[in-house]
Structure formats: C-alpha cells, structure tokens
Image (tube, rainbow, N blue to C red):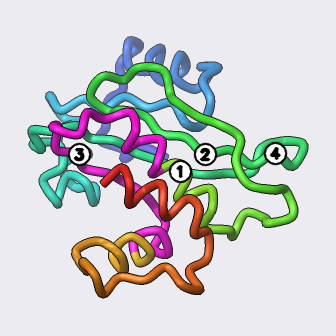
C-alpha cells in the first residue's frame, strides 16, 4: 500500500516489476553502499558492527539441507563476489541441527583465505561460535574430549 501523497514514476514501476520477475535464487544478493541503499545496509547487523569498512576479507558461511536430503556447506567471499565454494558434508541422518555443516563451511572459508589476510566471518549459528571460542586462545588448557563434530573442529583449529 502506498501513501496517498507518494508519486510513483513509470520507471520505478518498471524497476519493481523487473525485480519481481528476476529468476535469481534466495541466496543471491547485492550490497550497494551508495545512495538510499547505504542507509539500509548500514543498519543491518554487519553494518552496525563496522563490517562494511573492514579492511580484510569478509566471508559469509552457512550449512543447509538440499533437496533429496543432501547436506551441504559453503561460503562466499563478499568482497570478490566470486563463485561460492561448497561441498557435501556429514550424513543425512545427522539432520539440519547438526553443527557439522556449519563447522565445515567455516573450515572451507578458512582454507580459502590466505593466512596473512585478516578475515571477518559472518554466520548465523551460535553453536559454531561457542565451539570455536571454547578452543581458540586456550593454549594447553583446551581439550576436545567429548566435543561434538571433533573432526571438523580439529580442521578449523589447524587452519587457525
């Protein structure tokens, strides 16, 4: 619904219709930090945390169940916007709540980023953050005994 005092041009209507008819998937995005879109992006979590001004690599990762029950993990370098890197991980019987896929996406992102480059990793999984936090910076006190998804966690620690 539009406000009664709002004027919409034919050009704006065409742009909206073009966007609505786009065939892109739900994971396609464009971040434009100019004009009116800048206000929107700067109010997102990453914008408020200063992520768009981060000078290193900004990488987002996620894990998901695909059609047919296949579990996949992947990441994308948000600066280079190159093709996503992904792979099949885990076992279907682990289900989508398994931290395995999230850890696998994190490991892929670490492997795809030069060790000398600072990396900001964006994710939507609190369990992943807790698992990594539990091990990083603990030195000799860190232990993986009883840790779920220990294989992927070991890979992440080795990359760090």
- The part of the chain drawn in magenta is 106-129
Q: Earlier in the sequence, mark 1 or mark 4?
A: 1
Residue 124 magenta-highlighted: yes
Residue tagged 4: 70
On screen, residue 121 versus residue 108, left or right, reads left
From the top left corner, tell me how far across and down residue 115 is, in percent: 23, 40
Q: Are marks 4 and 2 in contact (CB under 8 Å)?
A: no
* Structural distance between the alpha carbons of marks 3 and 1: 16 Å
Q: Return the residue nearer the eye: 59 or 9.
A: 59
Residue tagged 3: 119
Label 3 neighbourhood size at 10 Å, few (<14), some (14-19), many (20+)?
some
Task: Say which residue appears at 64% left-offset and 36% top-offset.
Answer: 87
* Structural distance between the alpha carbons of marks 1 and 4: 14 Å
* Structural distance between the alpha carbons of marks 2 and 1: 6 Å
Task: Say which residue appears at 52% left-offset and 48% top-offset.
Answer: 105
Q: Return the residue nearer the eye: 104 or 31.
A: 104
Q: Are marks 2 and 1 in contact (CB under 8 Å)?
A: yes
From the top left corner, tell me how far across and down residue 109 is, in percent: 41, 42
Task: Say which residue appears at 48% left-offset and 41% top-offset.
Answer: 108
């Amino acid at each position: 619904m539009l406000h009664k005092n709002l004027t919409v041009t034919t050009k704006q209507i065409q742009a909206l219709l073009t966007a609505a008819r786009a065939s892109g998937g739900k994971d396609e995005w464009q971040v434009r930090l100019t004009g009116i879109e800048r206000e929107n992006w700067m109010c997102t979590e990453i914008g408020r945390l200063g992520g768009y001004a981060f000078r290193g690599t900004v990488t987002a990762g996620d894990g998901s169940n695909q059609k047919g029950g296949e579990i996949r993990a992947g990441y994308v370098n948000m600066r280079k916007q190159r093709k996503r890197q992904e792979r099949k991980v885990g076992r279907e019987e682990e289900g989508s709540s398994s931290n395995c896929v999230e850890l696998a996406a994190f490991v892929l992102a670490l492997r795809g980023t030069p060790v000398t480059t600072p990396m900001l990793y964006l994710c939507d999984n609190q369990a992943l953050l807790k698992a990594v936090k539990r091990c990083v910076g603990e030195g000799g006190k860190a232990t993986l005994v009883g840790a779920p998804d220990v294989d992927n966690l070991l890979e992440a620690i080795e990359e760090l």
